[in-house]
Image: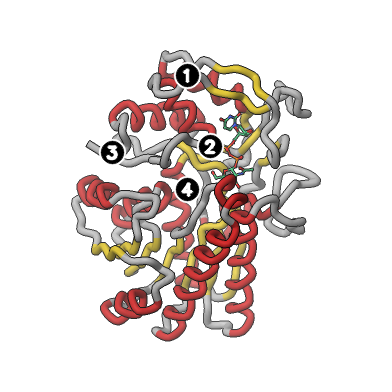
Amino acid sequence: MKILTTGGAGFIGSHTCVELLNAGHEVVVVDNFVNSQKEAVHRVEELTGKTVQLYEADVCDPDAMEQIFSEHTFDAVIHFAGLKAVGESVAQPMRYYRNNLDSALTLCETMARHGCKRIVFSSSATVYGVPDEVPLREDMFCKGCTNPYGWTKYMIEKILMGICDADPEWSVVLLRYFNPIGAHESGRIGENPNGIPNNLMPFITKVAAGQLDHLNIFGNDYNTPDGTGVRDYIHVVDLARGHVNACEYAQQHSGCEIINLGTGVGYSVLDIVHAFEKVNGIKVPYVIAPRRPGDIAECYSDPRKAEQLLGWKAEKNLDDMCRDSWRWQKNNPNGYQA
Ligand code: UD1
C-alpha cells in the first residue's frame, strides 16, 4: 500500500514508518516539525534502507494538502499529527482545539475530494475519562475527558464516526493507545520531548542520565498494590506494528472500528522505576510527591479486540521497554541534535 503518515517524524510516527517500510509498504510523510525533527525521517531511511518522501507542511493548510494529494494516490492515511501535551492544552485550549480539529477536518476533506477513504487515527485511552472499572473495553461508555487535549481526541473520533455513517465506503480505525514507551532497539530513533518531560519514562531516562536531579512520584496513596499509579505501558515498536495491521485491516473492511492498543497488563510507577534500575544497572533517585491533578489510580486495556480483528498483540515486555528507552537516551543525550 502507499500510505501517507501525518506527523510521521514524531515519536510514534517515526517508529510506524519503519515498520510500514519493513512490511513492504510505501511511505510519504507530512510534518511541520513543530514538535519533531527532520533527522528522525533520515534515520528511518537509514534503518530501513528505503526512501521516504517528505513534505514540510502543516496539515491545517488546505493548499499544501491539496498539493500532496495531487502528486500521489494513497491507499490509506495514518493521522498522527497533533499537539499532545496535556498541561499545555489546559493553558492553551484555543490553540489545541484549532490545531487538532482543523488538521483533522482539512485532512478528511482533502481525502474525500481525492477518493481516499481509509484512515487510521491516533486516538488515546484518555477518551475513556475516569473509568468505573478496568480493564477498559472499546464498548465502554466514555464519560468525558479531563483536559482539552483529550477532548480533541474524543471529538476527532466523533468526526470520523460521522464521516463513516454518512458514507459507508469509508474505512476508519480509531486506535486508542495506552502508554507508549521504549524506542527502536537500534537506539537511532526514540522519544524526544521539548524541554522537561511530562511523561514518566522520558523523565526517568533524563534522571538516569543525570540531566534531572530526581523523579517525583506523583502520589503513593492510590488504591493500587503499592499505592502508586498503574498504567498499561506498551513498547512503541509493538504499537507501530499495530498500525501496519490496522492499515491492512482497513483495506479489507469498511465502517468504523475502535481498537485498544495496549498489553492488558498494568504496572505501577514503582514497578517501572525498579525494572529500569535492574535492567540497566543504574539508580533512579526519586521522592514521593503529591498526586498530580487529573491523574487516575489505574488504567489498563482489554487488548482482545486488537487480537481478534487485527491479529495483533504486544510481544515486548517491560524489560525490553526499559532497556530500549535507556539505549536511546544514552546514545542521543541531546535527542536528534548533534
Ligand atoms: C498522559 C496523559 C494522557 C496522554 C498520555 C500520553 C494525563 C492526565 N494523561 O497519560 O492523556 O494520552 O500521557 O503519553 O496527563 N508519573 C510520575 N512522575 C512523573 C510523571 C508521571 O509519578 O514525573 C506517574 C503518573 O502519575 C502516572 C504514570 O506516572 O501514574 C504515568 O504518567 P504519564 O507518563 O504522564 O502518562 P499518563 O498520565 O498515564
Q: Position of residue 18 (x, y in %)?
A: 32, 51
Mark 2 or mark 4, whichever is nearer to me: 2
Amino acid type indicated by mark 2? Asn
- 67 in relation to 290, above or below: below
The reply to whether the C-beta atoms of the residues labelled 2 and 1 are less than 8 Å apart is: no
Report if residue 26 is visible in the image: no
Q: Which residue is mark 3?
A: 188
Q: Which mark is residue 239?
A: 4
Q: Of the residues under marks 2 and 3, which one precedes in the sequence? A: 3
Q: Of the residues under marks 1 and 4, which one precedes in the sequence? A: 1
Q: Position of residue 76 (x, y in %)?
A: 41, 70
Residue that appears at 74% across and 28% down: 224
On the rendered image, what quadrant is the N terminus found in? bottom left
- 310 in relation to 196, above or below: below
On the rendered image, what quadrant is the C terminus found in? top left
Q: Which residue is mark 1?
A: 213
Q: Position of residue 196 (x, y in %)?
A: 46, 34
Nearer the observer, 29 or 97: 97
Nearer the observer, 239 or 126: 126
Badge 3: few (under 14), some or many (20 or more) residues near its Cα, within 10 Å? Answer: some
Element at label 4: helix
Element at label 3: loop
Q: Of the residues under marks 2 and 4, which one precedes in the sequence? A: 2
Amino acid type indicated by mark 3? Arg
What's the CA distance linking mark 1 and mark 4? 30 Å
Q: Position of residue 140 (x, y in %)?
A: 75, 56
Amino acid type indicated by mark 1? Asp
